Image (cartoon, rainbow, N blue to C red):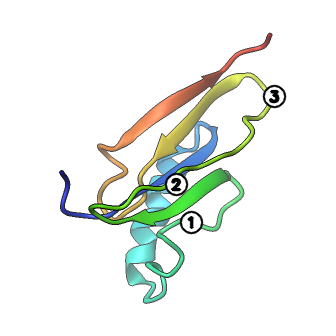
Amino acid sequence: MDSVPHNLVIGRPGSLARMGAEADRMLKDPKAMDRGYVPTIPEVIASMGMVFPGQTEGLDFTALKEPGDYDFVCTFPGHWRLIKGVMTVEKK
């Protein structure tokens, strides 16, 4: 079990570095936790708030129809460099 909160932010292809940089900038924002450390940038296509130890949360969204490798990441401060991945959308 982890002892810190996490979130899930899904972004457009190639958006990992931008989402991470914006998450780092949020450290200076006293209301960042209220916004779940979700950056307000056009690259973000879906997100969920912070989930604290012992909590669970789901995220329902419809993937975009445009094929590509969509980045996903935890934007809690410092996490985006390690807690990240790619969701691949393929053409049917």
**Is residue 2 shown left or right of residue 18?**
left
Q: Which image quadrant is residue 20 in?
A: bottom left
**Amino acid type indicated by mark 3:** Lys
N-terminal-most mark, 1 or 2: 2
| Residue 56, disc | none
Check disc 1 and report the residue beneath it: 39
Crowd around label 3: few <14 · some 14–19 · many ≥20 (10 Å): few
The residue tagged 2 is 19
Residue 89 x/y as whole percent: 67, 22
> In the structure shown, which secondary structural element does the residue marked by tag 3 occupy?
loop
At 54% from the left edge and 52% from the top edge, which residue is drawn? 9
Label located before the other in sequence (3 or 2) = 2
Residue at x 72%, y 57% (from the top left corner): 42
Q: Position of residue 27 (x, y in %)?
A: 38, 77
Relative placement, left or right, of 77 versus 26 is: left
Residue occupying image coordinates x 18% and y 62%: 3
Identified at 59% across, 56% down, the residue is: 47
In the rendered view, does 49 fall on the left or right side of 24?
right
Q: In which quarter of the image is residue 7?
A: bottom left
- Quadrant containing the C terminus in the rendered view: top right
Q: Name the residue under label 3.
A: 65
Badge 2 marks a residue whose secondary structure is: helix
User: Would you say the residues marked 1 and 2 are in contact, meaning their CB atoms lie under 8 Å apart?
Assistant: yes
Cα separation between marks 1 and 2? 7 Å
